[in-house]
Amino acid sequence: MSMVALKQLQRELRAEAVDPYMGEVGVSVWDVSEGREIFSHEADKSRMMASTSKIFTIGAALAHLGPDYQAETRLWSDGEIDDEGTLRGDLYLEGGGDPSLGSAKHSEVFHYGVASTGNDVVDAVQRAGVKEISGAVIGDGSRFDADARPTGRLGGLTYGRGKGDDVAQHAAESITSVLREAGIATAGEVTSGMVPQHADLLGTVRSPKLGELIRPAGKRSDNFISEMLARQLAVEVRGERPGTTRTGAEVVAQYARDRGSDIHQVDGSGLAFRNQVAPVSAVNFLREMVSQPFAAEFTDSLALMGVDGTLDDRGRNTSVHGAVKAKTGTHLVRGNTAKVREFRCSALTGICPGPQGRTLLFSIMQENPKSRYTALAAQERMVRSMMDYAQSS
């Protein structure tokens, strides 16, 4: 790689980083082919991650659970099924923390059309030979705690992201409606409660594989999925029951620290201002992720500039369009209700590909930029400079 080209890149990045309109800036750029950091500006100072937190949640979930992991919604009965196909008792829905469960429309809107649906529950009930339920449908969301923070409407059993104070009951009500539409009548009052010990397993509805579930979390910066994954980690890794956001965030932070990334993470999504990381630690984490067996699933969860997710309208018709994959992070100024809302912080962390392995990993973090336009325009100029360098011979 030409030293002249490198010096040019460094001049261009430094000019952006020291521009007072950019606010307080930290930048780290790593050249994979050379195995070294090629640019650094206040890269060791921790800053607010915002939704950059999601790359750590996604990475920890892939590592601990595996890309083929599937959450299970289990169907139980506390009565016998007679010769006419009537379940003489209640049908229990035990939530396994599937964030995708909902209607077909919900699947299209939130999960790129890859999700488990109420019709999957109907299929499982019918495979068990049930044509009618003499009792009620009861939702069990006890896998996760009922704390609504930080996103609201969380629980071990949700349907369409849950509504109301009791999301497990809402899920049971929604699925009862789907069952009735399929001709499976129910008689009892829908409610929530735990599966009794003497219940019999009727069937299982499995979520899409984790490699698919994480795509909206990364590309669209989906807070709900990210927080559900954090609580899933609390259950699966720490054995906590019910799983909590606090423990899930501890699992994520420990996984990152074990791989050389010193982060402070208190939730799965980055909604809290207390989530912080230094740009160099974010890049260190990317270095680890692109070398893992699940690297393809991880990188596929990042938004593609000019194409999809939170980057669909950025970098279009430039050298980065359809090439750079990255995760955005944004906190708005509290109390700002103006039509053009100002940033408390703005971040862009990702991968800039080049030929023959000359890939660059980068993290740009800004706090208190002068304006939304200033922050985003500067980030795009910096990424274009990196792309020009990576593509140069």
Image: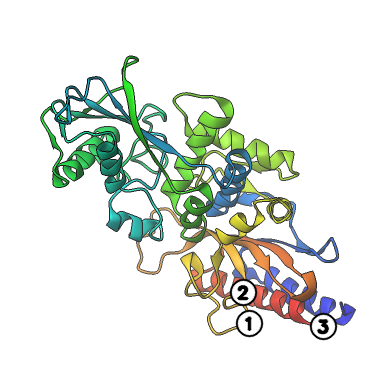
What residue did someone put label 1 on?
319
Per the model, the C-alpha gap separating discs 1 and 3 is 15 Å
> In the image, residue 41 lies at what x, y percent?
75, 62
Could you classify mark 3 by the number of other residues whose Cα lies within 10 Å: few (under 14), some (14-19), or many (20 or more)? few
Image position of 301 (left or right of 392): left
- Kind of residue indicated by mark 3: Ser
Q: Residue at the spot x=59%, y=55% of the render?
A: 297
Q: Where does label 3 land, which residue?
A: 393
Give the class, few, some or many, for how many residues have Cα within 10 Å of label 1's Cα (few <14, many ≥20). Answer: some
Residue 160 visible to the viewer: no
Quick one: label 1 or label 3, which is nearer the N terminus? 1
Q: Tell me the residue at 20%/45% (across/down).
A: 178
Q: Residue furthest right?
A: 3
* Residue reaching furthest to the front: 83
Which of the two discs, 3 and 2, labels the residue nearer the N terminus?
A: 2
Q: Is residue 98 above or below residue 234?
A: below
Disc on res. 323: 2
* Coordinates of residue 335 in the picture (x, y in percent): 38, 54
Cβ atoms at labels 1 and 2 below 8 Å apart: yes
